[in-house]
Image (cartoon, rainbow, N blue to C red):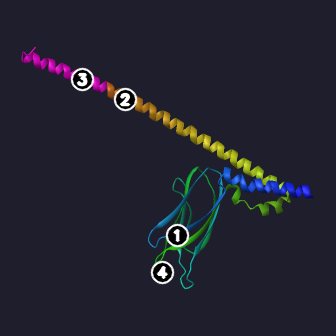
Amino acid sequence: MRREFATTLLLSTLFSFLVPELIPVGEGVWLNIPKTGTKCVSEEIQSKVVVLADYLVISDEHSIFPTVSVKVTSPYGSVLHHSENATHGQFAFTTQESGTYLACFEAVGNSHGNKDISINLDWKTGIAAKDWDSIARKEKIEGVELELRKLEAAVEAIHENLLYLRNREADMRIVSENTNSRVAWYSIMSLGICILVTGLQILYLKQYFERKKLI
Protein backbone atom coordinates (compact mmCIF):
# COMPACT_ATOMS: atom_id res chain seq x y z
CA MET A 1 0.00 0.00 0.00
CA ARG A 2 2.79 2.43 0.89
CA ARG A 3 4.66 1.54 -2.30
CA GLU A 4 1.55 2.25 -4.40
CA PHE A 5 1.02 5.56 -2.59
CA ALA A 6 4.66 6.56 -3.17
CA THR A 7 4.43 5.64 -6.85
CA THR A 8 1.20 7.61 -7.25
CA LEU A 9 2.76 10.62 -5.50
CA LEU A 10 5.84 10.45 -7.75
CA LEU A 11 3.76 10.23 -10.92
CA SER A 12 1.55 13.10 -9.78
CA THR A 13 4.64 15.20 -9.10
CA LEU A 14 6.05 14.44 -12.55
CA PHE A 15 2.72 15.26 -14.17
CA SER A 16 2.33 18.52 -12.25
CA PHE A 17 5.83 19.92 -12.70
CA LEU A 18 7.31 18.46 -15.88
CA VAL A 19 4.33 18.57 -18.22
CA PRO A 20 3.62 22.33 -17.96
CA GLU A 21 7.27 22.99 -18.81
CA LEU A 22 7.02 20.97 -22.02
CA ILE A 23 3.57 21.79 -23.39
CA PRO A 24 1.08 24.62 -22.82
CA VAL A 25 -1.86 23.10 -20.98
CA GLY A 26 -3.72 25.91 -19.22
CA GLU A 27 -3.53 29.52 -18.19
CA GLY A 28 -5.44 31.82 -15.88
CA VAL A 29 -5.58 35.42 -17.10
CA TRP A 30 -6.78 38.59 -15.35
CA LEU A 31 -7.88 41.21 -17.89
CA ASN A 32 -8.60 44.90 -17.39
CA ILE A 33 -10.84 46.11 -20.23
CA PRO A 34 -10.83 49.87 -20.87
CA LYS A 35 -14.17 51.68 -20.83
CA THR A 36 -13.71 52.37 -24.53
CA GLY A 37 -11.85 49.71 -26.45
CA THR A 38 -11.24 46.00 -26.73
CA LYS A 39 -8.83 43.66 -24.97
CA CYS A 40 -7.84 40.40 -26.72
CA VAL A 41 -6.04 37.24 -25.68
CA SER A 42 -4.39 35.01 -28.28
CA GLU A 43 -2.68 31.64 -28.31
CA GLU A 44 -1.05 29.66 -31.08
CA ILE A 45 -2.60 26.18 -31.08
CA GLN A 46 -2.17 23.25 -33.41
CA SER A 47 -5.07 21.42 -35.02
CA LYS A 48 -7.24 18.80 -33.29
CA VAL A 49 -6.72 20.24 -29.80
CA VAL A 50 -9.56 20.68 -27.30
CA VAL A 51 -9.93 24.22 -25.93
CA LEU A 52 -12.05 25.04 -22.87
CA ALA A 53 -12.39 28.46 -21.28
CA ASP A 54 -14.47 30.11 -18.55
CA TYR A 55 -14.77 33.87 -18.12
CA LEU A 56 -16.28 35.94 -15.32
CA VAL A 57 -16.75 39.69 -15.02
CA ILE A 58 -15.57 41.00 -11.65
CA SER A 59 -17.28 44.03 -10.11
CA ASP A 60 -16.25 45.78 -6.88
CA GLU A 61 -19.57 47.59 -6.65
CA HIS A 62 -22.71 45.52 -6.05
CA SER A 63 -24.90 48.21 -7.60
CA ILE A 64 -23.12 47.97 -10.96
CA PHE A 65 -23.30 44.86 -13.12
CA PRO A 66 -20.99 45.47 -16.09
CA THR A 67 -21.48 43.39 -19.22
CA VAL A 68 -19.13 42.59 -22.07
CA SER A 69 -19.24 41.40 -25.64
CA VAL A 70 -17.20 38.24 -26.21
CA LYS A 71 -15.97 37.01 -29.58
CA VAL A 72 -13.66 34.06 -30.27
CA THR A 73 -12.23 33.58 -33.76
CA SER A 74 -10.08 31.01 -35.55
CA PRO A 75 -6.87 31.78 -37.51
CA TYR A 76 -8.97 32.15 -40.69
CA GLY A 77 -11.56 34.44 -39.11
CA SER A 78 -14.33 31.93 -38.39
CA VAL A 79 -16.41 32.89 -35.34
CA LEU A 80 -16.27 30.07 -32.78
CA HIS A 81 -18.10 31.85 -29.97
CA HIS A 82 -20.03 35.11 -29.76
CA SER A 83 -21.95 36.46 -26.79
CA GLU A 84 -23.46 39.89 -26.10
CA ASN A 85 -24.24 41.49 -22.71
CA ALA A 86 -22.46 38.69 -20.86
CA THR A 87 -21.34 38.73 -17.25
CA HIS A 88 -19.99 35.18 -17.34
CA GLY A 89 -19.84 32.29 -19.72
CA GLN A 90 -17.94 29.38 -21.18
CA PHE A 91 -16.80 28.32 -24.63
CA ALA A 92 -15.35 25.07 -25.83
CA PHE A 93 -14.24 23.84 -29.24
CA THR A 94 -11.83 21.54 -31.00
CA THR A 95 -9.39 23.33 -33.28
CA GLN A 96 -9.71 22.51 -36.97
CA GLU A 97 -6.58 24.28 -38.18
CA SER A 98 -3.26 25.29 -36.71
CA GLY A 99 -2.64 28.94 -35.98
CA THR A 100 -3.44 31.79 -33.61
CA TYR A 101 -6.83 31.71 -31.90
CA LEU A 102 -8.17 35.01 -30.61
CA ALA A 103 -10.60 35.82 -27.78
CA CYS A 104 -11.69 39.47 -27.60
CA PHE A 105 -13.66 41.23 -24.86
CA GLU A 106 -15.33 44.62 -25.29
CA ALA A 107 -17.22 46.76 -22.77
CA VAL A 108 -20.92 47.13 -23.62
CA GLY A 109 -22.66 50.51 -23.41
CA ASN A 110 -22.59 52.29 -20.05
CA SER A 111 -23.09 49.17 -17.93
CA HIS A 112 -19.61 49.61 -16.45
CA GLY A 113 -20.32 53.01 -14.89
CA ASN A 114 -17.58 54.71 -16.93
CA LYS A 115 -14.93 52.51 -15.30
CA ASP A 116 -12.59 49.79 -16.50
CA ILE A 117 -13.88 46.22 -16.33
CA SER A 118 -11.98 43.32 -14.79
CA ILE A 119 -12.41 39.82 -16.20
CA ASN A 120 -11.07 36.52 -14.91
CA LEU A 121 -10.35 34.17 -17.83
CA ASP A 122 -9.47 30.52 -17.25
CA TRP A 123 -8.11 29.21 -20.58
CA LYS A 124 -7.29 25.50 -20.89
CA THR A 125 -6.01 23.50 -23.85
CA GLY A 126 -5.11 19.89 -24.54
CA ILE A 127 -4.85 17.56 -21.58
CA ALA A 128 -5.71 20.34 -19.11
CA ALA A 129 -9.16 20.60 -20.71
CA LYS A 130 -9.95 16.95 -20.01
CA ASP A 131 -12.17 16.02 -17.09
CA TRP A 132 -9.99 13.37 -15.50
CA ASP A 133 -12.46 12.71 -12.69
CA SER A 134 -15.16 11.76 -15.20
CA ILE A 135 -12.70 9.63 -17.14
CA ALA A 136 -11.66 7.83 -13.95
CA ARG A 137 -15.28 7.12 -12.98
CA LYS A 138 -16.24 6.02 -16.49
CA GLU A 139 -13.28 3.68 -16.98
CA LYS A 140 -13.10 2.70 -13.30
CA ILE A 141 -9.44 3.55 -12.85
CA GLU A 142 -7.66 5.24 -9.98
CA GLY A 143 -4.31 5.67 -8.29
CA VAL A 144 -1.26 4.67 -10.32
CA GLU A 145 -3.31 3.68 -13.35
CA LEU A 146 -4.94 7.11 -13.52
CA GLU A 147 -1.61 8.91 -13.18
CA LEU A 148 -0.14 6.69 -15.89
CA ARG A 149 -3.07 7.59 -18.15
CA LYS A 150 -2.36 11.27 -17.54
CA LEU A 151 1.32 10.80 -18.32
CA GLU A 152 0.43 8.85 -21.46
CA ALA A 153 -1.80 11.72 -22.62
CA ALA A 154 0.97 14.19 -21.80
CA VAL A 155 3.53 12.20 -23.81
CA GLU A 156 1.14 12.06 -26.79
CA ALA A 157 0.59 15.82 -26.55
CA ILE A 158 4.34 16.45 -26.39
CA HIS A 159 4.89 14.20 -29.41
CA GLU A 160 2.20 16.00 -31.41
CA ASN A 161 3.64 19.36 -30.38
CA LEU A 162 7.11 18.32 -31.55
CA LEU A 163 5.69 17.15 -34.89
CA TYR A 164 3.89 20.47 -35.24
CA LEU A 165 7.09 22.41 -34.51
CA ARG A 166 9.01 20.26 -37.00
CA ASN A 167 6.42 20.93 -39.70
CA ARG A 168 6.51 24.65 -38.92
CA GLU A 169 10.31 24.59 -39.16
CA ALA A 170 10.12 22.80 -42.53
CA ASP A 171 7.60 25.37 -43.85
CA MET A 172 9.76 28.26 -42.67
CA ARG A 173 12.83 26.66 -44.25
CA ILE A 174 11.02 26.35 -47.59
CA VAL A 175 9.93 30.00 -47.40
CA SER A 176 13.49 31.04 -46.52
CA GLU A 177 14.96 29.06 -49.41
CA ASN A 178 12.43 30.53 -51.85
CA THR A 179 13.20 34.03 -50.59
CA ASN A 180 16.95 33.47 -50.94
CA SER A 181 16.45 32.16 -54.48
CA ARG A 182 14.39 35.20 -55.46
CA VAL A 183 16.94 37.55 -53.94
CA ALA A 184 19.74 35.80 -55.86
CA TRP A 185 17.87 36.11 -59.17
CA TYR A 186 17.06 39.74 -58.41
CA SER A 187 20.74 40.44 -57.73
CA ILE A 188 21.76 38.76 -61.00
CA MET A 189 19.15 40.74 -62.95
CA SER A 190 20.23 43.97 -61.26
CA LEU A 191 23.89 43.27 -62.13
CA GLY A 192 22.96 42.45 -65.73
CA ILE A 193 20.94 45.65 -66.09
CA CYS A 194 23.81 47.70 -64.62
CA ILE A 195 26.29 46.13 -67.08
CA LEU A 196 23.90 46.74 -70.01
CA VAL A 197 23.32 50.38 -69.04
CA THR A 198 27.05 50.95 -68.57
CA GLY A 199 27.75 49.49 -72.03
CA LEU A 200 25.09 51.70 -73.63
CA GLN A 201 26.49 54.76 -71.88
CA ILE A 202 30.02 53.98 -73.12
CA LEU A 203 28.70 53.44 -76.67
CA TYR A 204 26.73 56.70 -76.58
CA LEU A 205 29.69 58.70 -75.25
CA LYS A 206 31.99 57.20 -77.88
CA GLN A 207 29.60 58.17 -80.69
CA TYR A 208 29.13 61.63 -79.18
CA PHE A 209 32.88 62.31 -79.00
CA GLU A 210 33.35 61.01 -82.55
CA ARG A 211 30.66 63.40 -83.88
CA LYS A 212 32.30 66.29 -82.05
CA LYS A 213 35.68 65.10 -83.42
CA LEU A 214 37.11 65.03 -79.93
CA ILE A 215 38.67 61.59 -80.47
Q: Residue at x 47, y 34 (%)?
A: 178
Mark 2 sits on what residue?
A: 187
> How far apart are the alpha carbons under marks 3 and 2?
16 Å
Q: Considering the numbered disc 4 on the image, is that residue within a helix, a strand or a loop?
A: loop
> How far apart are the alpha carbons under marks 3 and 4?
72 Å
Quadrant position of residue 209: top left
Mark 1 sits on what residue?
A: 32
The disc, 2 or 4, on the residue closer to the chain's N-terminal end is 4
Please name whichever residue, 144 or 67, is drawn nearer the observer in this view of the structure: 144
Query: Percent from the top left, x then y, of residue 40?
Result: 51, 62
- Seen in the picture, residue 57 relative to 125 is either above or below; the reply is below
The residue mark sitting in front, 2 or 1, is 1
In the rendered image, which quarter contains the N terminus? bottom right
Mark 3 sits on what residue?
A: 198
Give the number of callouts: 4
> How far apart are the alpha carbons under marks 4 and 1?
14 Å
Q: Residues within 10 Å of mark 4 (few under 14, many from 20)?
A: some
Query: Percent from the top left, x then y, of residue 22?
Result: 67, 50
The disc, 3 or 2, on the residue closer to the chain's N-terminal end is 2
| Residue 205: in magenta span | yes
Residue sitting farthest toward the bottom:
63
Q: Amino acid at mark 3?
A: Thr
Q: Amino acid at mark 2?
A: Ser
Please name whichever residue, 183 or 93, is drawn nearer the observer in this view of the structure: 183
Query: Percent from the top left, x then y, of residue 181?
Result: 45, 30
Please name whichever residue, 210 or 81, is drawn nearer the observer in this view of the structure: 210
